[in-house]
Image (cartoon, helix red, strand yellow):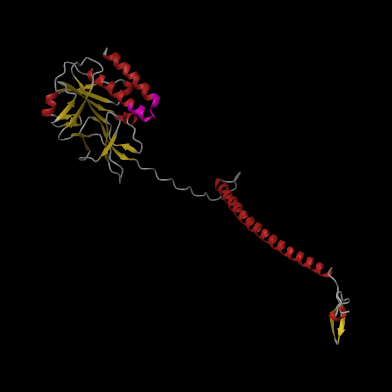
């Protein structure tokens, strides 16, 4: 029954991952399905288990690289004594679980090269594998779909001593990252060299911000070949294209300037044409007017009226 349930969970895990590996919500679902699957393989490692002893489980070949382990503890022993060393985890005293159970199982995960698959972090690079620590009810180790517990430290934090850590790039600062069961991501500083701390269960790793690659230098223009060839070299082709672009720009500028000059000349010619036309109209109007008779006054000529239109009349002429 346990292997049948494990097979079902494995198929569900693959379906979730294939359907939406690029979606954040689907990624969380895939990680949670992986937790359930690894829990089944961890529980299968128990064979007359002893309290406080770690038992390593086996995973299928298509998940090669992932390590899983399980440890059964009494609730009171975990709270009063802690666990000095459970793989990379150091669990202090004062750790309690919710809801309360008499016995519990701590499942350890090391995702290895699957870390970036189930917990992608854009902009960051993993320096160590993702390690997980989850708690489950241990009332019946042969049962399936056991409820997950929530364990938290009340005083001192849980420490994670990472052993497989890459050196960060020069100038970069390594940081701790944690993923809770809801998919929330939190960053913090290392407690000590290669040591992170947490107050609750989840998944943990050491990361560093990714450094964007510097732009490649521009390729130099190849010199022209000294010997004859069948066709133009790439250097000549690019040089010819650049010259063509330059000449197009120069021609556009010169053409624009010439066009502006022609427009200015056209405006000036239009104004002068209007002035000349007005002068001609004024001259015609002057020539069409009445011509005055000229008479000589001494040596000077002056205009004189030929006819007096209104004759002066004395007032006495009207007296009878």
294 above or below 261? below
Residue 294 is situated, as x and y percent measured from the top left of the image, at 87, 79
121 above or below 261? above
Residue 31 found in image quarter: top left
Quadrant containing the N terminus in the rendered view: top left
Magenta stretch: includes residue 245: no
Residue 87 found in image quarter: top left
User: How many numbered marks, from 0 up?
Assistant: 0
241 above or below 303? above
Magenta stretch: includes residue 25: yes
Taking 252 as reference, is 190 left or right? Answer: left
Q: Which residues are magenta?
A: 18-28
| 174, 198: nearer the viewer | 198
| 301, 261: nearer the viewer | 301
Taking 194 as reference, is 278 left or right? Answer: right
Residue 80 found in image quarter: top left
Taking 160 as reference, is 63 left or right? Answer: right
| 265, 290: nearer the viewer | 290
Single out the residue that lies furthest toward the top: 1
Taking 299 as reference, is 270 left or right? Answer: left
Single out the residue that lies furthest toward the bottom: 298
Quadrant containing the C terminus in the rendered view: bottom right
Magenta stretch secondary structure, dominant = helix
Q: Residue at x 16, y 21 (%)?
A: 101
Residue 120 is situated, as x and y percent measured from the top left of the image, at 34, 32
| 301, 224: nearer the viewer | 301
Single out the residue that lies furthest toward the front: 320
Residue 231 is situated, as x and y percent measured from the top left of the image, at 60, 44
Q: Residue at x 36, y 23 (%)?
A: 16
Residue 149 is situated, as x and y percent measured from the top left of the image, at 21, 24
């Amino acid at each position: 029954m346990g292997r049948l349930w494990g097979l079902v969970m494995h198929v569900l895990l693959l379906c979730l991952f294939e359907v939406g590996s690029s979606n954040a919500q689907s990624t969380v679902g895939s990680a949670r399905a992986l937790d359930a699957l690894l829990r089944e393989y961890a529980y299968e490692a128990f064979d007359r288990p002893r309290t406080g002893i770690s038992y390593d489980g086996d995973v299928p070949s298509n998940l090669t690289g992932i390590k899983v382990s399980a440890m059964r503890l009494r609730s009171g022993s975990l709270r009063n004594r802690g666990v000095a060393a459970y793989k990379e985890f150091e669990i202090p005293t004062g750790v309690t679980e919710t809801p309360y159970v008499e016995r519990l199982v701590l499942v350890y995960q090391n995702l290895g090269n699957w870390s970036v698959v189930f917990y992608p972090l854009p902009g960051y690079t993993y320096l160590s594998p993702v390690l997980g620590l989850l708690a489950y009810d241990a009332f019946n180790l042969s049962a399936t779909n056991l409820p997950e517990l929530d364990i938290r430290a009340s005083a001192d934090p849980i420490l994670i001593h990472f052993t497989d850590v890459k050196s960060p790039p020069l100038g970069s600062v390594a940081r701790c990252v944690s993923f809770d069961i809801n998919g929330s991501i939190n960053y913090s500083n290392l407690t000590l060299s290669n040591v992170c701390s947490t107050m609750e269960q989840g998944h943990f790793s050491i990361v560093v911000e990714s450094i964007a690659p510097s732009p490649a230098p521009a390729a130099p223009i190849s010199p022209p070949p000294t010997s004859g060839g069948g066709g133009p070299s790439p250097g000549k082709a690019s040089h010819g294209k650049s010259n063509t672009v330059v000449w197009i720009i120069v021609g556009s500028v010169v053409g624009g300037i010439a066009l502006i000059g022609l427009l200015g000349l056209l405006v000036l010619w239009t104004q002068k044409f209007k002035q000349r036309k007005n002068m001609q109209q004024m001259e015609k109007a002057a020539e069409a007017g009445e011509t005055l008779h000229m008479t000589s006054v001494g040596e000077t000529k002056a205009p004189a009226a030929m006819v007096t239109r209104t004759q002066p009349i004395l007032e006495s002429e009207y007296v009878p």
